[in-house]
Image: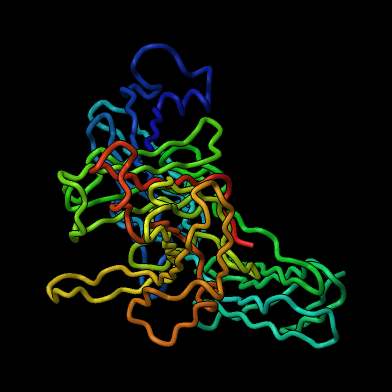
Amino acid sequence: MKFQVSAIALGCAALISGCGGGSSSSNGGVEQTIAFDFAGGQLIAVPPAVTTKKMSATASSNLPVTYASNTPDICSVSGDVVSFLKAGECSVTASQAGGNGYAPASQKQLFVIPKQPQLIMFRNPGSQPLDSTPVTLAGSSNIPNHPVTFSTSTPAVCTVSGTTLTKVADGICAVTATQAGDDIYATTTVVKNIPIGNATSPALTFLSGYKDTSHTTENGAISVAALTSENGWWCNGLCLTTVPADGSSFMFDFTPTLPTPADGRWIGTNWDLTILAPGLSALATGADTLSGVRIDAQAALKFNMAQNPEWFSTSDNKVKILMTLGHHVSVPDSDPTKPAKDCNVTLQALVTPTSAAATDYSVNLKNSFSIVESCGLTGLDMWNELQDYPISKIDFLANTLNLSVPNAGTTSTYRTQATFTGPITFQ
């Protein structure tokens, strides 16, 4: 982002009657402009570290530019480097003093220095009977010495005092855990909806539909992969994706043709539809991913899926579901000369289709999913992981590609096709 301003333009704004035509300013110098690149975008650092940014501004006269902070309590300037001292609005002016026949000029940049995010761990105690037994609430921030407080927006259903919840009536008890933040960390809240009595948990939407073959309606990124050793290990033009104009469904088709009929050899296969959470284009690197769907009291993953008849009729038509959480761990590379690798805790479940036709599936979170990737951590509890970290990515994979039932009229062409229709939700 660049802004330009001229000395004459500033002069005209201040005194219109003193401005005339021509290329000289009111003091006889030739007007010049300053292009000042946007200097913001960085988070405030955690003390004692200080975030700095080298600024870049140029004058059309090619004369040197100097910088000054207009908000020295928020940001300071030394030479062409700005230091972000605390969160807030930083204002810096780039100036050219004039000379060599040029009039002075200046340009101001005003930008926000954001606070550091923080993550609240607040586990839903789950559905509660309507009785007089109090419920103890527990929550914490991932930042030390940042206590969490609780409140409720549904006092007709439940009341909260300190960490004690009292049940009042049937319904959804909405409890908010809040960490008020400080000069470095942003205020953060997490809401848990606790069913009381005969109430059921609300649905959480991972996606409501498909904008195109690369994005959900909520702008989560979509990618596909499929491979076989008989096809060079990559899609090679055989991965076909289709989304209708109304965005109601997503179809993924992988139809390789083997050079000879399948004979039971190991040939290596894979099929994978990857969907990221709303607004996500990639998982964070080197840190937890804070975006995604946070499980509350929801009990199941729900979706609608169809398979092609050939795949459904094979001996293994199972679909593997991987749910990647925002919980990040840096793990050592097998090569000690290389940097550590990113790893995220991942859960897995297997679903056996009941029909080739479009069918609604409900996969129980507690009973069907287990931790398949712990990133070297021990003692992890699957339900606690779901409560503490968002679901940032879901993969639907063919447990085994169709390589035993060829397409009609062929002996060597095999199709693995899945169609997902409607929303993917948790409830």
Q: Position of residue 262 (x, y in %)?
A: 21, 51
User: Within the image, what quadrant is residue 85 found in?
Assistant: bottom left
Residue nearest the viewer, comparing 247 with 77: 247
* Residue at 36% across, 61% down: 399
Residue nearest the viewer, comparing 317 with 214: 317
Q: Which color mode does the image show?
A: rainbow
Q: Position of residue 205 (x, y in %)?
A: 60, 54
* Residue at 71% across, 84% down: 163
**Considering only vertical position in the picture, is 23 above or below 263?**
above
Q: Quadrant of the C terminus?
A: bottom right
- Could you tell whether 162 is left or right of 311 in the image? right
User: Within the image, what quadrant is residue 122 found in?
Assistant: bottom right
Q: Position of residue 388 (x, y in %)?
A: 53, 74
Q: Position of residue 309 (x, y in %)?
A: 43, 46
* Residue at 32% across, 54% down: 401
* Residue at 40% across, 58% down: 317
The answer to whether residue 85 is seen in the rendering is no
Residue nearest the viewer, comparing 288 with 203: 203
* Total number of numbered discs in the rendering: 0
Residue nearest the viewer, comparing 393 with 427: 427
Residue found at the very far top of the displayed protein:
21
